[in-house]
Image (spheres, rainbow, N blue to C red):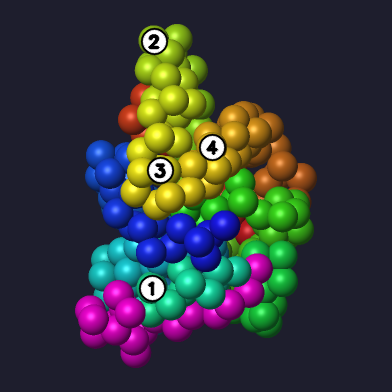
Amino acid sequence: MFNDIAPTYDKLNHILSLNVDKSWRRKSVRRMKKSLGNISNPKILDVACGTADSTIQIAKKIEIAGVSGVDISEKMLEIGGEKVEKLGLSDRIKFYNCSAENLDFQNDTFDAAFVAFGVRNFADRMKGLQQIRRVLKPNASLFVLELSEPQNVIVRWFYNLYFKNILPLVGKRVSGNAEAYRYLQQSVEMFPMPEEFMKMLQDIGYQDVKHKEFSCGLCRLYQAKK
């Protein structure tokens, strides 16, 4: 599915979110940068990196970082690689075609990890989060950016109208694949509520788990330490 929508993925993301997704990423990366403190030449992992929007944002904002982007979609990585090459960031960004559940890195490798809109797509959510924890260094932080259902009744009404009716139509018109954008809405609905997801992270062994909501709860950033 992700290979199929890869050519129009960036365009649709920005259209459908009215470019607000860029702001969510920027805010998340600022928090990541703060968490790194004075670490020199940090190594950062971007899981489910897709077409590398987040990977590029990390490399731009944390200038001394080396970033490893992983994704299961070859087409997404191909497009991401082209973007990285055009920006002259190939020396600092490397891509790996693998799943979150099977990260091909040694234990205690990374100083931070980021997952933007990807955890809900993990085939095995628990295993993927465990794998990320395994490759993080002690005290390193995980950042998970995810869409969520807003709690405010009025905002949720507009959210449901948009996600269930408008989004699949626009997705079909631009990408030719309405099912992919119905899946998006369904996957957001099936994602755990904040308290449940934070408990999942704690059960895996993460500490100092917290979250921050963006845009009236349309998106949330979870942060946790190994």
In the rendered image, residue 74, in percent from the top left (x then y), is placed at 53, 75
- Indicate which label's residue lies in the foreground, 2 or 4: 4
In the rendered image, residue 49, in percent from the top left (x then y), is placed at 47, 65
Q: Residues within 10 Å of mark 1 (few under 14, many from 20)?
A: some
Q: Which residue is labeled 3 in the image?
A: 171
Q: Residues within 10 Å of mark 3 (few under 14, many from 20)?
A: many
Comes first in the chain, label 4 or label 1: 1
Which three-letter amino acid code belongs to the residue tagged 1?
Ile
In the rendered image, residue 69, in percent from the top left (x then y), is placed at 48, 73
Residue at the farthest top position: 153
Q: Residues within 10 Å of mark 4 (few under 14, many from 20)?
A: some
Q: Which residue is labeled 4 in the image?
A: 182
134 and 40: which one is in front? 134
Which three-letter amino acid code belongs to the residue tagged 4?
Arg
Specify start and end residues of the magenta stretch as a single range.
82-99
Residue 108 drawn in magenta? no
Q: Which residue is labeled 2 in the image?
A: 154
In the rendered image, residue 164, in percent from the top left (x then y), is placed at 48, 26
Q: Quadrant of residue 61?
A: bottom left
Comes first in the chain, label 3 or label 2: 2
Q: Is residue 212 above or below residue 149?
A: below
Q: Is residue 13 above or below residue 152?
A: below
- Indicate which label's residue lies in the foreground, 1 or 2: 1
Q: Which residue is labeled 1 in the image?
A: 79
How far is disc 4 from disc 1 in space, using C-alphas? 23 Å
